[in-house]
Image (cartoon, grey):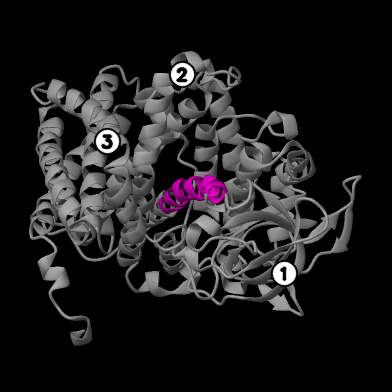
Amino acid sequence: MTVYKAPLRDYKFVLEELFDVGEIAKLPGYQDATPDTFAAVLEEGAKLCEEVLFPINLSGDAEGCHFENGVVRTPKGFKEAYDLFRQGGWTALAMDPDYGGQGLPATLNFFFSEMVASANLSFGMYPGLSAGACEAIHKHGDAAQKKTWLPKIIDGTWSGTMCLTEPQCGTDLGQIKTRAEPTERDGVYKITGTKIFISAGEHDLTDNIVHLVLARLPDAPQGTRGISLFIVPKFLVKPDGALGARNGVRCGGIEHKMGIKASATCVINFDEAEGYLIGGKHGGMRAMFTMMNAARLGVGLQGLAVGETAYQSARAYAMDRLQGRSLTGAKFPDKPADPLIVHPDIRRMLLTMRAYTEGARALAAWVAMAEDKANRLPDSAADEREANDDLVGLMTPIVKAMLTDNAYLVSNLGMQIFGGHGYIHDNGMEQLARDVRITQLYEGANGIQALDLVGRKMSQHMGRLMRRFFHPVDDYLRATMTDPALGEFAAPTYRAFARLQQVTAVLAQKGLANPDEAGAAATEYLRAFGLVALGYIWTRIAEVSLAKKASANGEAAFYDAKLATARFYMAKLLPETAALFASIGAGAKPVMELAAEAF
């Protein structure tokens, strides 16, 4: 069976030893977000995730959601769990206090959200979508819209969605056909059309569902420049805030999916539904990307989260399952066989899982802290604020794609360690592999993330975003690679990093002459960038672990494990960059020369 315990000790390491989360408390409005606050909130969140959400994960997958006569019912236990979640204030954790939120940092919400997704990815979809809707309304709504919609979504009484995809278009949103017809009331429109793949589009957890819908006005220009965003509630809201009549919004069905079966993925039909323009006419894409960018970081987090559960479960199984004898002689002669953990290939898989998961957590935390700084640093620190915002923008496609690609690998390695038992539903491992697969697809498939990196982020502001990573990493690795204690970590990372810089320059030049050159290399380039970024992170982890180990006070084994995992990463995982750089160097011809009709 799968197991899950919140990795609170690793959280403490990342927040207080690798990084200084105390910096967050120095930001305006975050003075109460001290390391003690982080620890207390995460400890309470862990109880909820371990005791309430994780126990209904497997059963929720087996039962799935039910659709009858336009009504969607979530699996047994989900409504009760959501009520506890809402009553505990977890929907309001990082929300604006002006509308009922607790005003805590995005970094803290990041770690809590990881626990939720580790315990029950399907459950986490419901509050996760609401958080994205809140962010868009908060940033782009007018005062009246914020007052009407935010308090109820923040307290969890209502929930939110984002409605982008239509049957004829996914990533290519310029093909959207949903219409928005103006009415006699200013700012009020009639929305007609069909949206598909709408997560949490209909369910029984909240009293109302607030849809954020992309649609076209009658005078809209073609393409994405002609898209507007509208607030379209399931139930209309009266002037006093009470719920009114049912709006022209109906669920046409739920998808029968490979994974996240307890998350209602819906077809939503809008039939002259009343909607309210947000973000200005033809400003829908700008407003929607407020949700999309946050969602992409959130999806990367989901990958990390499922990977953590897969690793914990595979580790427990490898410690207990007796199979064969060690190649160097029995390690447990009093038992009929040795546990799986003695076998080199099992250890290889577990170390791969551990290296990718713990490295991903630290990498994502670095980006989350930069996001808090970008959002909260005062005007007097405008340059620093810009630098952090640039880092978040650069790393978003890497976090989304790299962490989810690795998570799928990690979950499959976990299933491999379970052997045939991993293929059986009741043991839970195959669910993790199915659930995490969607993270490589939604909120922009990983190939789109790669194109975003090479097509937009690489050249944005004359390469300024790239310099936000390259310059500090270069300075750090140059300073540490000759250190006798750190050289084994910093030197191989620097070699890969230097090659990444060279490939970046060549790819930028070739891509300008022929965009197919950039397109053909994009996915491999993103992975190479991600592997180098993890190498940098693992070098920093090793540096801290070496320093802490000397006065570990009984925790030497914790730091020894970090160092061993860092060595494994450098020796066994980082070398993948060499093959990636060679493939990138082959150019676009091997990809593009075969005629389309010959496929």
Earlier-in-chain disc, 1 versus 2 = 2
> Which residue bears the numbered disc 3?
462
Outermost residue, top side: 380
- Residue 63 or 55: which is nearer the viewer? 63
Is 341 located above or below residue 537 in the figure?
below
Q: Position of residue 76 (x, y in %)?
A: 70, 66
Q: Is residue 54 visible?
A: yes
Identify the residue at horizontal 46%, vertical 59% (top origin): 2
SS at badge 3: helix
Mark 1 surroundings: few (<14), some (14-19) or many (≥20) residues within 10 A: some
Marks 1 and 2: which is nearer the front? 2
What is the span of residues highlighted in magenta in the rendered image?
286-303
Q: CA distance from mark 3 to mark 1?
A: 51 Å
Identify the residue at horizontal 15%, vertical 54% (top origin): 513
Task: Say whether residue 293 is magenta.
Answer: yes
> Which residue bears the numbered disc 2?
23
The kind of residue on which mark 1 rests is Arg
Outermost residue, bottom side: 597
Is 537 located above or below residue 432 in the figure?
above
Mark 2 surroundings: few (<14), some (14-19) or many (≥20) residues within 10 A: some
Earlier-in-chain disc, 3 versus 1 = 1
The kind of residue on which mark 2 rests is Glu
> Which residue bears the numbered disc 1?
73
Q: CA distance from mark 1 to mark 2?
A: 44 Å
Marks 2 and 3: which is nearer the front? 3
- Residue 492 or 281: which is nearer the viewer? 281
SS at badge 1: strand
The kind of residue on which mark 3 rests is Met
